[in-house]
Amino acid sequence: MRVRAVFVDFGGVIMRTEDKGPRSRQAERIGMTSRDLEKIVFESDSSLRASTGEISEEAHWQAVSKALGVDRQEGEKIITEFFSGDRVDTVLLDFLRSLRPDRKVGLISNAWSGLRKVITTNQFADVFDEMVISAEVGLVKPDPRIYQLALERLGVHPKESVFLDDMLINVEAARSLGISAIQFTQLGRTLEELKHFLIDTG
């Protein structure tokens, strides 16, 4: 069956941490490891609640500042530096743009409420026919319902779709629904795998 839609994750795929130095420096400055800092930012209770839309992204950052023992202004400085080593993959975005209009492109991301603004501000909202963001829909991967919602929004069947994600658990969840899925590891390798799917299905 011909692939009619390609779905992609955001963090770890479109946006990746290319320089871990800023995170390490900020962690050292406040007396913790970079892994401990990442846990507070990405794996804390407030992060999960923000990912499901239960609280706003701003509320999450307030909780992060409290956990770090700093005021909100200092917390903002830490977080700005924390993300300064992250880069948007313009090569991947251009490839996704090249698929349209023959194929549809969708985003499926576990993310806080500010992601849509980030994408719009950085001027690549045009890449996507639909953006399914967990904070907006109240569902997070690997919950099968978030994939089903994405399929419905693009009007495609699982067998007509390919999904890219850096987390194996999310890849396996997509496959369990009949979606072809690729674990993102390295751009060149991932694009080659994706092209095989697109060529093999016509």
Image (cartoon, rainbow, N blue to C red):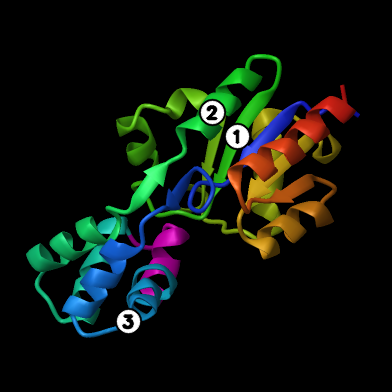
Mark 1 to mark 2: distance in Å?
A: 5 Å
Mark 3 to mark 2: distance in Å?
A: 36 Å
- Mark 1 or 3, closer to the camera: 3
Q: Nearer the viewer, residue 117 or 146?
A: 117
Instruction: Indicate the secondary structure of the residue bearing disc 3.
Output: loop
Instruction: Indicate the secondary structure of the residue bearing disc 2.
Output: loop
Q: Residue 54's spot in the image, x, y percent?
A: 40, 62
Q: Of the residues shown, which amino acid type is indicated by label 1?
A: Gly
Q: Main secondary structure of the magenta part?
A: helix
Q: Circle 3: is it few (<14), some (14-19), or many (20+) Cα within 10 Å?
A: some
Q: Of the residues shown, which amino acid type is indicated by label 3?
A: Thr
Q: Are marks 1 and 2 in contact (CB under 8 Å)?
A: yes
Q: Quadrant of the C terminus?
A: top right
Residue furthest to the top: 101
User: Which image quadrant for residue 169?
Assistant: bottom right
Q: Nearer the viewer, residue 31 or 176?
A: 31
**Up/down of 59 relative to 31, above or below:** above
**Up/down of 128 relative to 88, above or below:** above
Q: Residue 118's spot in the image, x, y percent?
A: 34, 40
Counting residues from the N terminus, which is met first, the one under dot 1 or under dot 2? 1
Is residue 14 found left or right of 190 in the rendered image?
A: left
* Residue occupying the point 75% across, 52% down: 174
Q: Residue 14's spot in the image, x, y percent?
A: 50, 42
